[in-house]
Image (cartoon, helix red, strand yellow):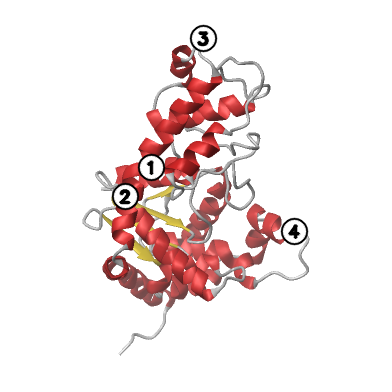
Amino acid sequence: MARIFSGIQPTGDKHIGNYLGAIRHWVTSQSDHECLYSIVDLHSITVTVEPTALRDATLSLATLLFAAGLDPKQSTLFAQSHVSEHMELAWYLNCTATMGELRRMTQFKDKSGGQESVSVGLFDYPVLQAADVLLYQSDLVPVGEDQRQHLELMRDIALRFNGRYGETFVVPQAQIPTAGARIVDLQEPTKKMSTTGGTEQGTLLLLDTPARLRKKVMSAVTDSDGIVRADAENKPGITGLLLLLSAIEDVPVQTLEARYDGRGYGDFKQDVADAVVTLLEPLQTRYAELAADPGEVVRLLNVGATSARSLAVPTVELVRERIGFAPRG
C-alpha cells in the first residue's frame, strides 16, 4: 500500500476551494493508501504570527479536518511541531541542499520580492518541506502546480543524499490530482478563491453560516447575457459558478449547461447556493460537536503524533548512522 504525505498550514481560514481541491481527496484516499497528514505549523512561523492566534488556528484546523472525515483509525493527523524529527532531519538535509537551488525557488522570489529583510526560514522553507516528506519514506505527495518545483527539489535532495551515503530515502513521486475545477472568487472571478488575496464577499468559508453562504452565492458577479453557459473570457462569473457546481456534484459542465438551458441566473444561483449549503452542512454539524470538546481534539492530535514518531524516529536513526554520527547511549 502506497504511503502518502501531505501538509496544510493552519494560518488562514479554509474555504470551499481548499475542501474541493484537497481536503475531500484526503478523506477518500484513506481507504486505499497509508496516509499521513500534517498541520505544518512550523512552516507558518516563516512570517510573524501572534502566538495565541497560531495555537487557536492549529486546533481549529485539526477540528475542521476531523469534522471533514479524516478518521484517526484510517489515517494519521498530527501537528508538525509535535514531531521534533522534522527539525532534526531538516538540518541534515540543509547540508545536502545548495544555496543555488534555494535561490531558484519561485515561491521565495514571489514572497520576498520588494522586502529589505526576510527570514532565513522563508528561504529555507523548501528544505523543511523536503524533510516533512522524506522523514516518512513517503511514496506519493499530492501537489498542485505551485508546489511542483518544491517536489522536484526534494527528489533531488533525496537522490543526492542516497548517492552520497547509500540508499536511505524513498524518492517520492508527485500525485497529480485529476483535472478539477479552479474555484474562483465570486466577486473577482478572474482570480482564484483565496483568504489572503481574495475578497471577503467572494470567498465561501467552510464555517460560514448557511445564510452567509447563500448571500455570497446570490450576490456573485455575473453578466447581462442571461444564458447559463461556460465562457471563461466573456462570462467569467457564470463560468466560475458552473465549475463550482460541477465540482460539488461531480458532473461535467456540459451537463449543467443542458440542465439550465432556457432558465435564468436566479434559478441557477439558487441551486448553486443549495448545493454549497448541503455539501458543508455535515462538516459544520460535526465541527460544532468536536469544538464542544477541545480536549478530545488535543488527544487525537497526540495519538497522531505518537503514530507519526513511530515512523520518523527510525528514519532519523538511519540517517544518523549513514552520515557517521556516533551511536547514542
Q: What residue is shown with label 4?
A: 113
Q: Earlier in the sequence, mark 2 or mark 1?
A: 1
* Residue 270 percent across, percent down from the top left: 47, 27
Quarter assignment of residue 25 = top left
Disc 4 residue crowd, few under 14, some 14–19, many 20+, Cα 10 Å: few
Residue at which label 2 appears? 285
Disc sitting over residue 100 in the figure = none
Q: CA distance from mark 4 to mark 3?
A: 49 Å
Packing grade of label 3 (10 A; few <14, some 14-19, many >=20) is few
Count residues near mark 1 (Cα–Cα under 10 Å), then give few for <14, some for 14-19, many for 20+. many
Vertical arrangement, residue 18 with respect to residue 73, above or below: above
| Residue 26 position (above or below residue 73) | above
Amino acid type assigned to the residue bearing label 2 in the image: Thr
* Residue depicted at x 44% and y 50%: 207
- Mark toward the start of the polypeptide (3 vs 2): 3
Q: Nearer the viewer, residue 256 or 156?
A: 256
**218 sits left or right of 284 in the view:** right
Labels 4 and 2: the sequence-earlier one: 4
Q: Which residue is mark 3?
A: 262
**Is there any visible trace of residue 299 in the rendered image?**
yes
Give residue 35's position: percent from left, percent from top: 31, 53
Residue 23 lies left or right of residue 269; in this view the side is left
Tell me which numbered mark, 4 or 3, is placed earlier along the sequence: 4
Residue 293 location (% of width, % of height): 28, 66
Depth check, mark 4 against mark 3: the one in front is 3
CA gap between label 3 and label 1 equals 29 Å
